[in-house]
């Protein structure tokens, strides 16, 4: 019975320690590395990280597509976990399925399935960036027709249901093809759903040089001219130059200049050129990897660009399941203890971001050691503390916090006895122990 009560108490404490996230944050309110890349496969994550997190950079962006047929939680949680290890921020574009050259028109009854799947994942950072479909101002992207009213209605319902599931979903509209009646499509969306821009948190742009790499500026200005006052941070999820039209050297120059000038705009959150590795038609001309397996020289050109050390917000939370310390200690000496804890947040715990704190004046934590503990894993933390310089019992509570002192776990009690012994007492105690052991 006592075991059942104790077990129930531990479970309740564990559940209480999982802190829900409440709302998106402005990605430009923290140090942000806008350099990113669009990928086709999770096999490209290592090369993507090497590209976007080089030269002082950290936490760059990666855009990728998940189709209805690919909603496998196990697979994508593994992908997200790998992105977490590589410090890559995911931008997920949801898609239906291709039927020949045409993408199937989305069904509203599938929205709940999308929400359930996306909400089941432990995301890499607090903001959960989701792009709802792709270029619906192309008939081939919307079941063979163009219908801004239908898209606006779908986007609104998708956004409402995502945000009902979690306030951390950062909803982005589909990037539009700027060469295909883009303005008329935006007008049609607003006519059908006048408040549609209240349903999104940023703007997605496909600023290709065939129109202008600064096309996003014209798009935002046009939206403002329609009476939309909301400031929309910009995500350029597609852009890039054709390697059939320009030499790798010229593409490298263009990308370097764009990142350092035109895209170095305080309104731009991320720029993820299309595409890191895709040597099949019709997109082979935009691939950064050559058919032979090596990267074109512009990969190295972008890798050499000085970047920002991004610091996206992550949910820190956990639970101390058990904590022990030496039961008997000489006053004023060091004691050692151990913590068995569970990481329930988004960050990978390490010596760089975790701290042990004690409540009260009994113990002074001096140092601690742990191997990295990933989300939803348990791990052991060893600590050393200075004991009180007095005789008697000590009672102490310890907890884990972020390095800035913000608590992330429950408190857990530890206790022991402080006794003074001389050399003769130690010898007698040791002899008695040997006698018990018949040694």
Image (cartoon, rainbow, N blue to C red):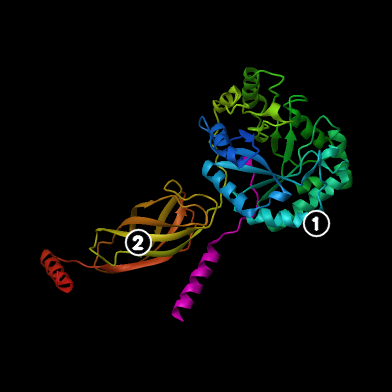
CA gap, disc 2 to disc 1?
58 Å
Where residue 121 appears, x then y in whole percent? Answer: 62, 54
Would residue 167 be visible to someone looking at this image?
no
Question: What residue is disc 1 on?
Answer: 109
- The circle drawn on residue 253 is none
Q: Is residue 279 left or right of residue 33?
A: right
Look at the magenta stretch and give its main secondary structure.
helix
Q: Is residue 67 left or right of residue 410?
A: right
Q: Secondary structure at mark 1?
A: helix
Range of residues picked out in magenta: 1-27
Q: What is the tally of numbered marks visible in this picture?
A: 2
Where 124 sits versus 323, above or below?
above
Where residue 322 appears, x then y in whole percent? Answer: 41, 65
- Residue shown at the point (57%, 33%) measured from the top left: 52
Where residue 409 appears, x then y in whole percent? Answer: 48, 60
Would you say the residues marked 2 and 1 are in contact, meaning their CB atoms lie under 8 Å apart? no
Question: Does 15 appear in magenta?
Answer: yes
Using a 10 Å C-alpha cutoff, classify the residue at mark 2 as few (fewer than 14 neighbours), some (14 to 19) or many (20 or more): few
Q: Earlier in the sequence, mark 2 or mark 1?
A: 1
Q: Nearer the viewer, residue 375 or 67?
A: 67
Using a 10 Å C-alpha cutoff, classify the residue at mark 1 as few (fewer than 14 neighbours), some (14 to 19) or many (20 or more): few
User: Toward which corner of the image does residue 144 lie, by quadrant?
Assistant: top right
Where 251 sits versus 318, above or below?
above
Where 372 sits versus 398, above or below?
above
User: Toward which corner of the image does residue 337 lie, by quadrant?
Assistant: bottom left
- The circle drawn on residue 361 is 2
Query: Quadrant location of the C terminus?
Result: bottom left
Q: Secondary structure at mark 2?
A: loop
Q: Nearer the viewer, residue 79 or 307?
A: 79
Where residue 300 appears, x then y in whole percent? Answer: 56, 25
Would residue 308 be visible to someone looking at this image?
yes
């Amino acid at each position: 019975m006592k075991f059942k009560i104790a077990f129930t108490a531990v479970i309740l404490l564990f559940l209480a320690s999982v802190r829900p996230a409440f709302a998106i944050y402005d990605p430009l309110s923290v140090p942000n590395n806008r350099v990113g890349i669009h990928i086709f496969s999770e096999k490209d994550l290592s090369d993507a990280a090497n590209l976007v997190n080089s030269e002082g950079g950290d936490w760059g962006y990666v855009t990728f597509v998940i189709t209805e047929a690919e909603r496998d939680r196990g697979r994508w949680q593994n992908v997200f976990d790998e992105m977490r290890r590589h410090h890559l921020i995911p931008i997920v574009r949801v898609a239906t399925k291709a039927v020949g050259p045409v993408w199937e028109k989305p069904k509203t009854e599938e929205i709940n399935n999308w929400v359930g799947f996306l909400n089941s994942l432990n995301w890499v950072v607090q903001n959960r960036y989701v792009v709802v479909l792709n270029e619906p101002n192309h008939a081939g992207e919307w079941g063979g027709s163009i219908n801004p009213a239908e898209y606006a209605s779908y986007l609104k319902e998708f956004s409402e249901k995502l945000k009902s599931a979690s306030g951390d979903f950062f909803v982005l509209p589909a990037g539009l093809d700027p060469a295909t009646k883009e303005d008329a499509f935006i007008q049609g969306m607003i006519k059908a759903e006048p408040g549609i821009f209240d349903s999104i948190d940023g703007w997605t742009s496909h600023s290709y040089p065939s129109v202008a790499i600064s096309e996003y500026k014209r798009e935002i200005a046009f939206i403002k001219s329609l009476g939309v006052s909301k400031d929309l941070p910009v995500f350029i999820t597609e852009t890039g130059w054709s390697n059939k039209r320009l030499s790798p050297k010229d593409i490298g120059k263009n990308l370097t200049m764009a990142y350092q000038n035109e895209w170095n705009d305080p309104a731009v959150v991320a720029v993820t050129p299309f595409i890191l590795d895709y040597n099949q038609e019709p997109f082979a001309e935009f691939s950064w990897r050559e058919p032979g397996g090596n990267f074109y020289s512009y990969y190295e050109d972008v890798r050499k660009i000085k970047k920002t050390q991004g610091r996206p917000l992550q949910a820190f939370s956990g639970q101390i399941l058990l904590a022990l310390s030496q039961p008997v200690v000489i006053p004023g000496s060091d004691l050692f203890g151990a913590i068995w804890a569970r990481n329930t947040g988004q960050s990978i715990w390490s010596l760089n971001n975790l701290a042990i704190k004690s409540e009260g004046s009994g113990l002074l934590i001096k140092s601690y050691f742990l191997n990295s503990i990933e989300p939803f894993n348990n791990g052991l933390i060893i600590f050393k503390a200075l004991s009180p310089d007095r005789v008697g019992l000590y009672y102490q509570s310890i907890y884990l916090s972020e390095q800035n002192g913000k608590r992330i776990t429950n408190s857990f009690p530890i206790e022991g006895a402080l006794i003074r012994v001389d050399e003769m007492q130690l010898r007698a105690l040791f002899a008695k122990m040997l006698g018990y052991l018949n040694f």
